[in-house]
Amino acid sequence: MGILDRVLRAGEGKKIKALAGLVPEVNALEPSMKQLTDDALRGKTAEFRARHERGESLDDLLVEAFAAIREGALRSIGQRPFDVQLMGGSALHFGWVAEMKTGEGKTLTSSLAAYLNGVSGRGTHLITVNDYLARRDSEWMGRIHRFMGLSVGLVIPGHKETPAEKRAAYGCDITYGTNNEFGFDYLRDNMAVRLEDKAQRGHNYAIVDEVDSILIDEARTPLIISGRIADAAKLYYKFASIVRSLKRDDDYEVEEDKRIVFPMEPGIEKVEQALGIANLYDEVQQNLVHQLQAALKAKELYKRDKDYIVQGGEVKIVDEFTGRILEGRRWSEGIHQAVEAKEGVKIKEENQTLATITLQNYFRMYDKLAGMTGT
């Protein structure tokens, strides 16, 4: 019976015990691993890869691979994964979420599953929440993987930006990076005209750190690539001025739960009078109806010091879950420009959405997905 079968047949309530049952098997191989020279230990990686190519599953290789990478970690960075980390690494390999307390070493735990899956050569992605952690882990844990003969790449903003450099990073056995950069690289690939301009090579296996934050709090936050279109600043300011004089329920209706607004006939007549036109809906080529909708939404649905702040003459979005400022993020479909007009700050050139995806939908593309959380 295979390892995964043994664990799954244990049932939900006994999975931790089943994972614990793998630990003595790994520990039993420790003396033999210690007797190997560095070259011989590194040669285990090539052996595992060859056996996998001949048909052995990664589940079959788990015990030996964990014993090898444990010794590799001790020799390369002076840290020996504890038994609880072997259990956590096994859970990650099986595509589960591992909840580990502070001090139990999530980073070292992830290196175990990353090594085992890196042996396949199909790509293993280690995904974290910020550039600092991605760079740190790629250097720190990367020392273990490189010692064991695996290649390690890093994808963060400003690091190896050309298509060839990005493609090389994704071509490594193990690739570290941030959730946003993985998502944006996918969007850029979908916009690429030539095959050689694409960076990613597929979505085989990913380990997501702080999975509760990325896949719950930010799951539906869209990643957006935009391009500049004609500046409509004057119209945004004009509509911001017009809607200030319009009265809710008399000139327009608001459904806050659905985040939509409905201009009513009296309001439409006032807008037409202010613009000096006979029929607002005959002027759609100027996008006036959209401008009115954006201005009304900015007035009623986007609240200062709740949804955004004004800082340094700029409108900055506030994360609804954490309260943190989302530097560089902008609302799409003209909303950000309408809010800028409402606040009387300088309007940046309007952007048109070229490609978008939520993190939730991006991570659904992986054949196997695992996560770590400290809570």
Image (cartoon, rainbow, N blue to C red):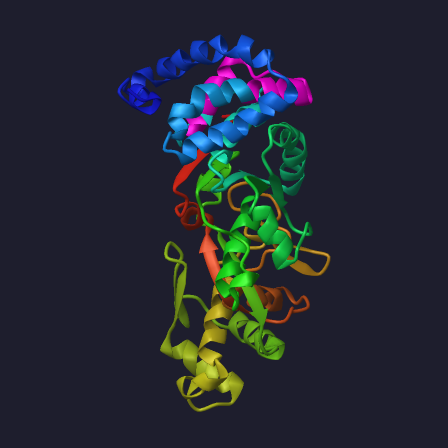
Was residue 142 drawn as part of the magenta stretch in this picture?
no
Q: Is residue 78 magenta?
A: yes
In this orientation, which residue lies closer to the viewer: 8 or 118? 118
Magenta region: 69-93
15 sits left or right of 83 in the view? left
User: Can the viewer see residue 248 in this picture?
Assistant: yes
Considering only vertical position in the picture, is 180 above or below 269? above
Q: Nearer the viewer, residue 191 or 316?
A: 191
Place of residue 67 in the rendered image (x, y in percent of width and height, measured from the top left): 51, 17
Q: Where is residue 93 in the image (x, y as percent from the top left)?
A: 43, 29
Q: Is the magenta stretch mostly helix, strand or loop?
A: helix
In the image, what residue occupies the spot 51% across and 66% down? 353
Name the residue: 65% across, 69% down: 347
Residue 223 in the image: x percent, y percent? Answer: 51, 55
Which residue shows up at 40% across the image and 66% down it? 261
Above or below 74: residue 176? below
Splitting the image into 4 quarters, where does residue 92 fall? top left
Image quadrant in which you'd find residue 154: top right
Q: Can residue 96 be seen in this view?
A: no
Q: Which quadrant: the N terminus?
A: top left
Q: How many marks?
A: 0
Q: Nearer the viewer, residue 136 or 48?
A: 48
